[in-house]
Amino acid sequence: MSPQTHRTAVITGATSGIGYHTALGLAAHGITVVLACRHPGRMRATAEAIRAQHPTASIDEVTLDLGNLTSIHAAAQQITTRHPHLDILINNAGIMNTPAWTTLDGIEMQFGVNHLGHYALTMLLLDNLLTAPHARVVTVSSLAHRRAHTDIEQWPHPRDYRPSRAYAASKLANLLFAQELHRRLHPAVHTAMSVACHPGWSHTNLPYLGPRARGHRAAVAGLRVLAALVTQPAAKGALPSLHAATRPDVTSGSYLGPTRLGHTRGPAGTDRPAAAATDPDLARRLWAVSEKLTGITHPGLTRRAETCTWTETTSRADTTVT
């Protein structure tokens, strides 16, 4: 990753794991980092940890609860006021395999936080992003998207709730959103890009949330043993996000991830999503559902009539981000 100066990036969920290491990498290269996180105390500790390694880092903090549309509107207002010019938005925050929780707006929690909250935040920040010459919206998905069912209208309010199925649906939603945003930006002759990525199998706190919420201590212990055996460090898992956000050879519509061992670990490069993630009809339906549930639309994004396919990046698949 080449040095960057005078750029501003917003990243959600940066207090640990992939998000923290992504924020750290951005700050290391002179990019102003806006942390958008739910817990002010943890966010403050994250900012201090980044400054401990990079004393000159420029960091802002905005409290954001992606499960609450009121909070999203308030956070977006703060960000747009403080940072009229945005270059990068990284939709990173996520939850996994939770009990049958709902957001404050009554939406299934994993779909609400992982997709719908990020859809709303992106739409509210898009005008500021479009002031940058080559802004990027990076949406972090997961290999789990391959297991998702495609009954989109059921995702916000599933009749038969299954934690792993809901998580997979939210991650497919991330990819469908990134693809549809790419389609809608390009016919409007915007230079902004929409890029998706995934961290492979990386060691983060994400898998433990569900078992902890259910009081399953043995499951948490088992997951920790498994993670030690099969996952890569979170710092490695952040490389696709950093690649997607900053590398000049990345193109809009790309999907990036680790390139080794079935795209579960290793250097960042091109990956191919599941067929459902490239379905323009599914993407259009999800966009309509998202507009209806949030009440947020962006008049500048027009829908191109003809069908498009996912644009493959021309970057080398074995390129390492350092």
Image (tube, helix red, strand yellow):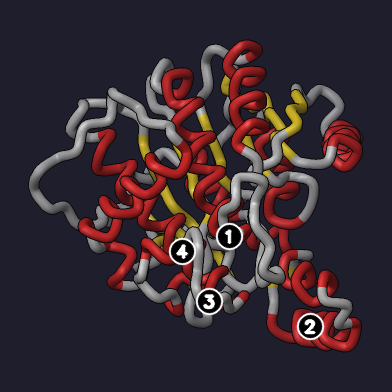
Mark 4 secondary-structure assignment: loop
The one of 298 and 207 positioned closer to us in this rendering:
298
Q: Earlier in the sequence, mark 2 or mark 1?
A: 1
Q: Name the residue under label 4.
A: 155
Label 4: how many Cα within 10 Å (few below 14, some 14–19, many 20+): many
Q: How far apart are marks 2 and 1 (CA)?
A: 24 Å
Q: Mark 2 points at which residue?
A: 223
**Amino acid type, callout 1:** Glu
Camera-side mark, 1 or 3: 1
Q: How far apart are marks 1 and 3 (CA)?
A: 12 Å
Residue 30 vs residue 228: left or right? left
Label 1: how many Cα within 10 Å (few below 14, some 14–19, many 20+): many
Residue 102 image point, x, y percent = 65, 57
**Amino acid type, callout 4:** Trp
Q: Mark 1 points at which residue?
A: 108
Task: From this view, report whether residue 216 is shown above or below residue 300.
Answer: below
